[in-house]
Image (tube, grey):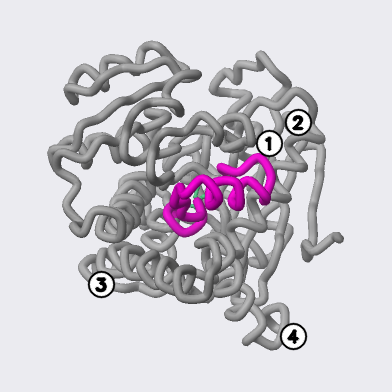
């Protein structure tokens, strides 16, 4: 079933690259979601990614209790493409034109492959952009806040499984040391957690060494003997095959779209592994951006909203337990309920 409000696929005027903007829902408010600038075997794979990621943004905002809708932009780069600065600027301007043409229905932000400087450039063409650097009036890099929100989710899970929100001595495997993963690993190391880490980029090993973490190869880390696995890389890491290998008690991380297919949530549940939906654990970044830039909250109020992810997760685990559901089902039901409570698309 096609459930998106609109999907725009355009060949960029300057770059000639496919710019894909998927607006999943504006039922709760204007849509927001990051710009993913990434390689795909085929541009159609970029469309599939945009469709899934934008739907997850709708759920992310609904469960976080924020009046925003879900969207996402993907620029599908052919495999092996390296963008020089000029071409990168062309791509970003093409994205900005497309967003501007949507007239505020959707605002973008950073995601895999983009950051605050890119948002600054987009901001020269359209005002519908989050996370520009602070000196330009934006809320800056969202990744530390995504990491902070994931830490809050981890505390809720730790309390459920081990009776304490403290993570010192807990064994965690962080899969991916990008902007969010590395930040989260730092927070966890500062808490005294025992870390195992990996990244597909061997240069990231330095970060692991700095944190006193054990390095593990990307294809072995999911089977590591740890308490909690923390996916912080690209999506679809949880498949029937990888779930069978897990030795942990929980999987909680900031990566978007962790499940290869929705039924993998049931496989995790059947194995007695607690999975917190990615769109719940990863909400800290957007919660920070939207609360700061749209709702103009003070920094301590924004921080309280990010930390409230702990209560959200606790609530979902309670509901799941009392109704005999998986946390994934409890989260889907909460999102549906919040979306149903509204009349329809914003402005209608
Ligand atoms: N990458 C962020 C996410 O998936 C998207 C985002 C961050 C969008 C900040 C807007 C502002 O949640």
- Reply above or below: 267 against 336: above
Mark 3: few, some, or many residues within 10 Å (few <14, many ≥20)? some
Mark 1: few, some, or many residues within 10 Å (few <14, many ≥20)? many
Residue 135 in sight here: no
Query: Which residue range is magenta in the image?
Result: 258-282
Using the image as rendered, state which of residue 2 and residue 160 is in the foreground: 160
- Reply above or below: 70 against 273: below
User: On the rendered image, what quadrant is the N terminus found in?
Assistant: bottom right
Q: Earlier in the sequence, mark 3 or mark 4?
A: 3
Residue at numbered disc 1: 75
Do callouts 1 and 2 mark residues in contact (Cβ within 8 Å)? Answer: yes
User: On the rendered image, what quadrant is the C terminus found in?
Assistant: bottom right
Residue at numbered disc 4: 348
Residue at numbered disc 2: 17
Mark 4: few, some, or many residues within 10 Å (few <14, many ≥20)? few
Q: CA distance from mark 4 to mark 2?
A: 33 Å
Magenta highlight on residue 268: yes
Magenta highlight on residue 114: no
Percent x, y for residue 27? 66, 76
């Amino acid at each position: 079933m096609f459930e998106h409000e609109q999907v725009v696929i355009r060949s960029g005027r300057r770059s000639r690259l496919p710019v894909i903007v998927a607006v999943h829902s504006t039922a709760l408010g204007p849509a927001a979601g990051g710009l993913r600038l990434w390689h795909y075997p085929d541009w159609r794979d970029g469309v599939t990614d945009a469709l899934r990621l934008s739907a997850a943004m709708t759920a992310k905002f609904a469960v976080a209790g924020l009046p925003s809708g879900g969207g996402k932009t993907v620029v599908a780069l052919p495999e092996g493409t390296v963008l020089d600065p000029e071409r990168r600027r062309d791509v970003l301007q093409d994205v900005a034109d497309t967003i501007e043409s949507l007239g505020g229905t959707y605002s973008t932000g950073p995601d895999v492959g983009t950051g605050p400087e890119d948002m600054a450039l987009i901001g020269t063409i359209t005002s519908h952009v989050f996370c520009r650097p602070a000196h330009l009036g934006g809320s800056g890099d969202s990744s530390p806040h995504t990491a902070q929100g994931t830490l809050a989710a981890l505390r809720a899970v730790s309390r459920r499984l081990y009776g304490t929100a403290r993570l010192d001595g807990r064994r965690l495997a962080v899969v991916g040391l990008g902007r969010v993963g590395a930040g989260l690993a730092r927070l966890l190391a500062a808490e005294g957690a025992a870390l195992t880490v990996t990244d597909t980029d061997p240069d990231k090993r330095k970060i692991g060494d700095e944190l006193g973490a054990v390095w593990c190869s990307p294809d072995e880390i999911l089977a590591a003997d740890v308490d909690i696995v923390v996916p912080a890389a690209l999506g679809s890491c949880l498949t029937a095959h990888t779930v069978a290998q897990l030795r942990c008690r929980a999987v909680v991380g900031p990566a978007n779209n962790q499940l290869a297919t929705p039924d993998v949530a049931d496989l995790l549940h059947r194995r007695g592994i607690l999975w917190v939906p990615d769109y719940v654990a990863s909400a800290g970044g957007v919660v920070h951006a939207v609360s700061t830039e749209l709702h103009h909250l003070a920094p301590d109020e924004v921080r309280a909203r990010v930390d409230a992810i702990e209560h959200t997760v606790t609530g979902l685990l309670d509901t799941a337990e009392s109704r005999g559901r998986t946390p994934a089902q409890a989260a889907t039901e909460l999102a549906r309920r919040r979306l149903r409570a509204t009349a329809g698309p914003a402005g209608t």
